[in-house]
Amino acid sequence: MVEVHLWSGLRSLTGGQQVVEVEAKTTGELLRALVRAHPQLQAPIDAGVSIAVDGRVIATGLTEPIPEGSEVYLMQRLRGG
Amino acid sequence: MALDDRKSDFTFVGTRPNRPDGLDKVTGRAKFGADAYAPGMLHGAILRSPHAHARIVKIDASKAEAHKDVKAVVTRADFADVPFKPGLEGEFYNVLENVMAGEKALYDGHAVAAVAATSALAARDALKLIEVEYEVLPHVTDVDKAMAPDAPVIREGAADYSVPEGMHPNVVRYHESGHGDLEAGFAEADLIIEDSFVTEATHQGYIEPHACLAILGNDGKGELWCTTQGHWIAQKTCAALLGIETSQLRVTASEIGGGFGGKTTVFIEPVALALSRKANRPVKLVMTRSEVFRATGPTSSASMDVKIGMKKDGTISAAQGIFRLQGGAFPGAPGDMTAMCAFAPYNLTNVKQIGYDVMANRPKQAAYRAPGAPMGAFAVESVIDELCNKLGLDPVEVRLKNAAHEGTKASYGPTYERIGLVETLEAAKAHPHYSAPLKPGQGRGISCGFWFNHGGETSVSLALSEDGSAQVMVGTPDIGGSRASMALMAAEVLGIPYENIRVTIADTATLGYNDVSHGSRVTYASGLATIKAARHAVEKLCERAAAKWGIPVDAVKWENGCAVPSGPNAGDFDPMPLADITADMGRTGGPISGHFEATPEGAGVSFGTHIVDAEVDPETGKTSVTRYTVIQDAGKAIHPTYVEGQYQGGAAQGIGWALNEEYIYGEDGRLQNSIFLDYRIPVASDLPMIDTVIVEVPNPGHPFGVRGVGETGIVPPLAAIANAVSNAAGVRMKRLPMSPPRILAALKDNG
C-alpha cells in the first residue's frame, strides 16, 4: 500500500482525508487508484498534477515506479517560463 | 530516471568556449522572426479593441474587403471552435479566445479582426475600414477589486472545482497547502509581523517582437516560421485552432530575440495562418511594440498578506501567506506556484499557504521566469527582513538557521533530496560583499529564492559524419546558450573537440516532439537527451571497433575519443579514434547515429541567495543599485559564462521589476504606457556590475549533475532590492515598483 499525501485544498473532495492509502506500483496506477477511492479527485487530476516520490518531483510521467515504502505527495502540475 | 552512471570529472564541461551563434548575431546573418520572406507574400495587421470590456455587437468588414489592396479579412468565424483536440480543451479555448475575440472583447488590445494586404501600410490602413459596434461593459483591472462582490463578471462558469463556495466568479482557481499547527506555532513566537504587499504586472520585455511568416493552403498543408520558445506547442495549438491535422503543419523556430516565458504560447501565428488560408498567399505578421505590451503576456499582478512568527534566537515558529494573483481575462495566474514557492527555502514546522487565480480585464498573463515565485518571495523575505531588524538579528544567520536542506519537509509537502540552499547562504556570508562597509544613505538587502525546475518531453538526434565531426539536432529553441552547452556535453561523451560539433534547432518535421524551452528545462532535459544520444552512438562505435578487432563488444570501452580494449585480456590493440571508425562506417554497417526520446523526470529544485546594496536620494526618490551579488546553485555549470549570464539577466530584470516597470491602467481600463519610453526597462547605465558566484551541488537526477538556472535568478531580486531600499530609506517598502514617486510618498508618510 502507498500512503498518498494530498495538498490540503483537496480535503473537501476526500471527506476530510489528507492522506489516502492506495495500491499502486507506478504513478499512473496511483492516479487511477486515487480516483477509484475518491471519484471527486478526477477533476484535479484532469486539471493537471505532479507526483513527488521520495522528494523527486515527477511532473507528468505515468510510468514512473513507486518503490515500496516511498514517500508520495500529490502536487499541482508545475508550470515554468 | 535512476542514474547509476554519474560523472564528476570533466574535460570539456565547465570550460568557456566561444558561442556558436556569435558570428551570426554580430554580423546580422542570424534570421529572426521578421527575417523570413516568401514569393507573393502579403502583410497582416490586427484590429484591436479600444475597450477594456465590451460586447461585440457587429463587425462590418465589407469596406475593407472591397479595397483593392486587401486580399483577406478574418474574424473569429474563420477559426475552428470545435471539435476540441485531445489535451487542449481548456487551454485551447482560452488561447483561441485570446488570439481572436468571440462574443466579447475582454481587455484593451484584444484582437477582434485581421486583414492581409499587399503591403504593411495598406494592411494598417485597411483596419480603419472595418466597422465594429461595441456595447461597452463595466470593467475591472485591479486584483482586489476583481474579487470584490460588486466586480463585473468577466466570464461566468470559468471557476473550477477548487474554488470555495461564495467566492466571486472572477476567482477561478484556489490552492491551499501546508502542514503543522499554525496557532501553536504563532503562540511560540516572541515577535509576529503581519503585513500586506502589492506588485504590479510587468512585461517580459524581450527585444524582438512577435513575428511570423505563415503559409496555409486549402489542402490543409502549411508552413510556419516564427519566433517562439516551443515550435511543437505552436504546431499543436495552431493546428487545433485552424482545424487541420498537426502533422500537416511544419513549424520552424527562428533565431529568438528573447522570450523569458512570454513566447511559450501563440498570439499572431494562428491569425497569420487563417489569413493565408483565406488569401491563398503567404502572410507575414509582425507586432509593433505597443501591440506586444497591450496584447501579449505580461506577468501577473499580485496582492499578498504574509504573517510570520519568530523566536528571539531567529527560529521561525510559524508562517502563513495569502497570495492573490491577477492573470488577465483568462484562468492561469500562477497563484498556486506563488503559494508553493513562497516558503520553500525554509525548514518550517508550521506553515500554510493559500493562492488565488483571479481574472481581470487585462491581457492573458504569460509565464515570466519562475512564474509566480518572485512576488511571493518579495512578501515573505520582506517580513523576514523586518523581523531580523526588530530582533536585532543578522539576516544571513537567520536564514541559515531556518534553511531547508536534504531531508527537510518542504513547505509544499515532500522531503527534499540533496539541495544547495545552505551552500549559497554560506557563500553569501563568506563573500566580501556581505562584510563591505556601507556609505551613509545606503542599505543592504538579502533574499533567498526557490524554483522547481522542469523536465518535459524531449527528443534529440545525433549523427556522426565520415570525417569524425558530429551534428546534434535538438528541438528546444536556444534562449540561453543551449547550443553551446549541448555541444560541450556531446563533446564530453564522444571525446571530440567542441568545435567539431554543430548543434541545430530542428523543425517539427525533422525530429520527434519536444516540449517548450521553459521551466529551466533545456540544459537539464535536452542535455540529458544529448548525453544519452551520444552514448547511444558510442555503443555503436564500440561495436564497430570490436568487429574490426575480432573481439567481443563488451571487451571494448570508450576513452578520450577512442575505442580501446577494456583490459589486458581483451587483446593488445592501439586506441582506435572516432574518425577512424566513421571513415568507413558506410561499409561497416551503415551511418552511425544516436537517439533519445523520453520525458526526463529528475529536474532537481534550485535555490539562490542575492546580496544588494542600494542608495536612495531623499530629494528625488531615485534609487541606485550600487552593488549586486548573485549566488545560485547550478548543480553543474556546463558553460559557466552562460550560467553567469543567466544569473546577471535575472538580477537585471529583477531590478527593473523592483524599481520602475509596471503596467499602468487608466480609469477607462486602457493601458497608459505601451511603449518603451513610458514603460522603462533598465538600460546599461542603470545597472551596477552584477557579480556572480556559481555554487555546484550536483542534481542526482542528471548524469552530469545539472540543475536548471534560467528562472531561479529572478526570484530573489524583488525582495533583496526592496530590503536594501527599505533599509536605506528607513521605511518598509510594501509596493512595487519602488518608483521615485512611491519612495517620496513613503518617506513623507514616515515623517
Image (cartoon, rainbow, N blue to C red):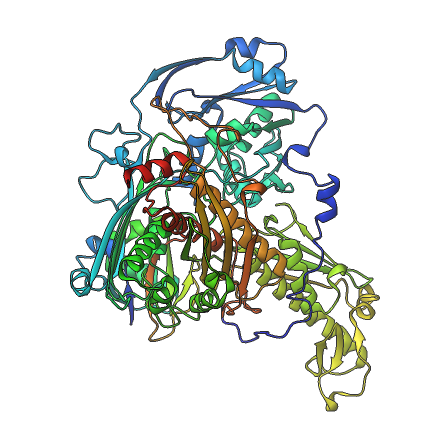
Question: In the picture, which quadrant includes the C terminus of chain B?
Answer: top left
Image quarter of residue B333 = top left
Q: Residue at x 38, y 53 (%)?
A: A77
Q: Nearer the viewer, residue A38 or B514?
A: B514
Q: Residue at x 27, y 32 (%)?
A: B156
Q: Answer left or right for B544 relative to B267.
A: right
Q: Answer left or right for B144 relative to B239.
A: left
Q: As displayed, is residue B52 above or below residue B19?
A: above
Residue B14: where, in percent of width, then height? 64, 66
Q: Nearer the viewer, residue B90 or B297?
A: B297
Give the number of marks: 0
Mark yes or no: residue B85 visible.
no
Q: Nearer the viewer, residue B664 or B670?
A: B664
Q: Answer left or right for B659 relative to B122.
A: left
Q: Answer left or right for B550 relative to B504.
A: right
Residue B242: where, in percent of width, then height? 51, 32
Q: As displayed, is residue B228 above or below residue B374?
A: above
Image quarter of residue B595 = bottom right
Determine the residue located farthest toward the bottom in the rendered image: B569
